[in-house]
Image (tube, rainbow, N blue to C red):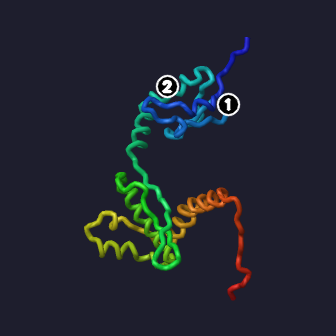
Amino acid sequence: MPVQKTKFNQSWLSKCDSNGNLVKTWLKQGSTETTFICTLCHTGNLDCANKGWKAIEQHMQNEKHKRNLNSLKNNSKFSVLISSSSSTSSTTTDIVQLTNHNKSLTFDDQVSKAEILWALKSVQHGFSYKSSDETGELFRLMFPDSKVAEKFSIQHSKMSYVISHGLGPYFRDRLVEDVKSCQRFVLCFDEQTNN
């Protein structure tokens, strides 16, 4: 008599863990239809063929998983919100604001936040990448009591990487979302060359 194996069920993703969090934040189907992966614990394929959902519940009781879940909860990240505001002239400028000023960030995240905000400021005002080469030293001189300024480090190559590979995809996705939400749009380009 053939043994019936339980397949990964997509409806499991709408279930909650013991803390009331949706499991879809960390649960994914494995490479086969009878396995699952915990992205939080960076597991390989875990088998659910014999136990089904019970196998996932057992994984949730694992001490490593509980520690990783607590670390995720305690690690607050910041996100960028873009809003337009009019200046005194008819032009509009984009202002970058943190969506929640009250979230506590780890020290490394505070340093990353400072570097990202500097990159955004540089783009907004057209600073060259090279102009960032000595900003870390300048900030340390300006703010000698700041631990964030002490660790702030962004040279032209890192600035280029942060803008193109770090921030670029976020803003590209936002642009695509805006274009998709429009009923109509016109794409124009200037045929005049700059020689």
Q: In the current view of this chain or complex, which residue is farthest to the left?
A: 145
Percent coordinates x, y for residue 75 in the rendering: 40, 47
Percent coordinates x, y for residue 72 in the rendering: 43, 43
Q: Is residue 137 above or below residue 174?
A: below
Confirm whether residue 32 shows in the render. Answer: yes
Dot 1 amino acid type = Glu
Residue picked out by circle 1? 33
Looking at the figure, which quarter contains the C terminus?
A: bottom right
- Of residues 137 and 162, the one nearer the viewer is 162
Percent coordinates x, y for residue 165 in the rendering: 57, 62
Percent coordinates x, y for residue 48 in the rendering: 60, 26
**Residue 62 position by quadrant:** top left
Report helix, strand or loop for mark 1.
loop
Confirm whether residue 42 shows in the render. Answer: no
Residue picked out by circle 2? 58
Q: Residue at x 40, y 56 (%)?
A: 109
- Of residues 54 and 24, the one nearer the viewer is 24
Dot 2 amino acid type = Gln
Q: Residue at x 37, y 56 (%)?
A: 101
Q: Residue at x 59, y 37 (%)?
A: 28
Mark 1 nearby-residue class (10 Å; few <14, some 14–19, many ≥20): some
